[in-house]
Image (tube, helix red, strand yellow):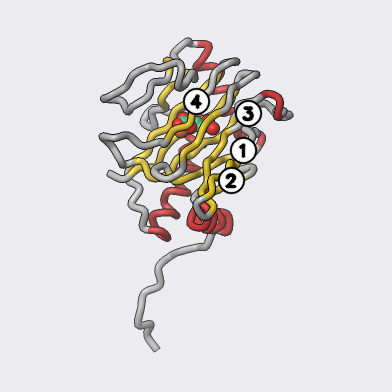
Amino acid sequence: MTQLFEEIDFVENPLYEQIIADIISQKYAIVEDFFTDDEVQVLRQSLLDKHEEDVFKKAAIGNRVNEVIVKSIRGDIILWIDEAHTNAAESLFFTKINNLVGYLNKTCFLGILRKEFHYAIYPQGTFYKRHLDTFQNDDRRKLSFVCYLNEAGWLPENGGELVLYLDDDGREVEKIIYPLPGRVVIFESQVLEHEVKPVHTQRLSITGWLKTR
Ligand SMILES: O=C(O)CCC(=O)C(=O)O
Ligand SMILES: [Fe+2]
């Protein structure tokens, strides 16, 4: 008998399914080893090489058309990554990101059409005060994505923990997340307020946003 419906090519991915389930149920997902040790190593080296070239800028608040630098709010330095001009490490990074985005768009109809990512260095003594990742003049950021590139053996006393402020039936609870290498945190940009606690040892990451339009 001829098939009535054409089958759509789709392979379920348990890791991505877990991410989606976690975001739906708790508004965030934590993935250990999203990047392998080797991948973290090349991404960290890429970040450090670019920092050697001194191309990082003080991070601002507000978006790119409306930004101000306020050290009392955030003290990290950043470098945007241009997907059209990637090195080997960055192209490996975007391959994984684009895979995830393709899956999210197929299964959750999130309509992610754009993305933006930057390297971030938090020098000793810096922090990012409690905030939401959306702007008054721009609500296109849907999911925030942070990937930590610190050395293996990162200790709690190094500081720099990410704190997500969650709502538990009207009661606020803090979810503390240590920036362990290879660990990825994904959360709803428009919903979850969060903060980076003061850093006692230089803290390295890539942060980005999956956006509509
Ligand atoms: O690095 C982190 O853990 C979070 C960074 C952050 O909140 C941001 O860049 O908006
Ligand atoms: Fe943020």
Can residue 16 be seen by looking at this rendering? Answer: no
Q: Which residue is mark 3?
A: 41
Q: Amino acid at mark 4?
A: Tyr
User: Does 51 appear above or below 63?
Assistant: above
Of labels 4 and 2, earlier in sequence is 2
Mark carried by residue 128: 4
Q: Secondary structure at mark 1?
A: strand
User: Does 104 appear above or below 37?
Assistant: below
* Percent x, y of residue 113: 32, 45
Real-space CA distance between mark 3 and mark 4, rounded to the nearest whole angstrom = 25 Å
Real-space CA distance between mark 2 and mark 1, rounded to the nearest whole angstrom = 9 Å
Residue furthest to the bottom in view is 1
Residues 121 and 61: in front is 61
Q: Amino acid at mark 3?
A: Gln
Mark carried by residue 30: 2
Q: Secondary structure at mark 2?
A: strand
Circle 1 Cα neighbour tier, 10 Å, few/some/many (<14 / 14–19 / ≥20) = some
Circle 3 Cα neighbour tier, 10 Å, few/some/many (<14 / 14–19 / ≥20) = some
Of labels 2 and 3, earlier in sequence is 2
Real-space CA distance between mark 4 and mark 2, rounded to the nearest whole angstrom = 20 Å
Q: Is mark 1 within 8 Å of ligand 1?
A: yes
